[in-house]
Amino acid sequence: MHGILIIAPNWIGDAVMTQPLLASLKAQYPDSNIDVLASTWVAPIYRACSEVHEVIEAKFEHKQLQWGLRKELAKKLAIKKYQACFVLPNSFKSALIPWLANIPFRVGYRGEFRFVLINVALNNPSKINRPPMVDHYLQLSELLNGGQASLTTSNLMPKLNVSAAANHSVKAKLQSVQIDEAHIYAMCPGAEYGPTKRWPTSHFAQLAESLIASNPNNQIVLLGSKGDHPLAQEIHALAKQHPHIHNWCGNTSLDEAIALIGMSKAVISNDSGLMHIAAALKTPQVAIFGSSDPAHTPPLSDKAKVIWLNLACSPCHKRECPLGHLKCLNDILPEQVFATLNTLKT
């Protein structure tokens, strides 16, 4: 196959979980170039995938058709004469570009009235009986080769690489504020989905204090987006502005966040995109789950430990706790997370 285009998902965690699909396609078509069309937000994930030939960035906006932008992109992509395109989001608009670009095989899941736009399709699984996301994406790789799977289960774990440029940039930042890279714990307090995925800031603060008390060389770096900056400020304040706690939320690019996670001793996170990055980098980690289901979106790494209370009311998949108590997260105590950190493979 001459060339393959991937239309990337819009969320970081989902993007990470597409890497086994890329590996499968590369194994099936080793002479093909695999290019990825991605929003600026998730493009760094694909720059960290060794299977990708070119990342084509586009300023896609949530819930916007952007018809002019899509027509313009389709015109440019048509010149490349891709033979197949894998459309990973379920939306109608995500399938427009490969159709407009006249790509012969347009592979994806059925949905949102895109019967003509997607011409090699699988039925979407029901929300009640959803497979893990890696499997969900990987199943698409079997549509063009007669249903022959090309990866074994052991290869299903996503794998990312840290760019040399991002690594150099992060090391310079650490040096400028005198942080020893050998003693970094990354904490990721955010979760785009909402409060029912966010472990309390007071618990993060207490855990940070425990880690510093256990070894005065330990440094805590809080990672996340600009939107997570207030959460990190709150953690820092609750930990009495300890000088070994550093709020980097919104102050790193995603490429730099990937590099910092890659050099950390361990990562403590909610169920979030950064959790999946840590898993794909094989950084030791503790992943804290509340309203979501670790069977569906677990961190796929043998160095990951999941803490989930499996209460009768969870997973509820709600953005706000419908019962008002958020016990699924409040009742996961810092002492439990600290003890779990001490059991990790490093």
Image: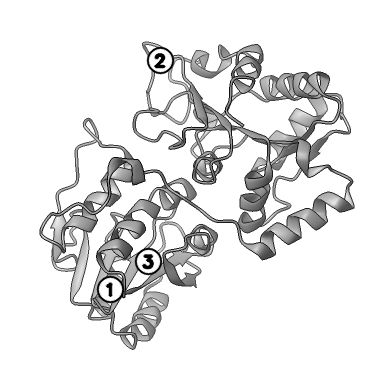
Task: Give whichever of 8, 276 is nearer the camera.
Answer: 276
Q: Which residue was labeled with disc 2? A: 310
First-in-chain label (3 vs 1): 3
Picture residue at 47% right of the left edge, 21% below the top: 321
How far from the left and from the top, in percent, is residue 56? 46, 73
Image-quadrant location for residue 169: bottom right
First-in-chain label (3 vs 2): 3
User: Can residue 242 be seen?
Assistant: yes
Q: In the drawing, does residue 167 fall left or right of residue 95?
A: right
Tell me the kind of residue under disc 1: Pro
Q: Which residue was labeled with disc 3? A: 65
Q: Element at badge 3? A: loop
Q: Which residue was labeled with disc 1? A: 98
Q: Mark 2 and mark 1 in contact? Answer it, CB < 8 Å.
A: no
Tell me the kind of residue under disc 2: Asn
Tell me the kind of residue under disc 3: Leu
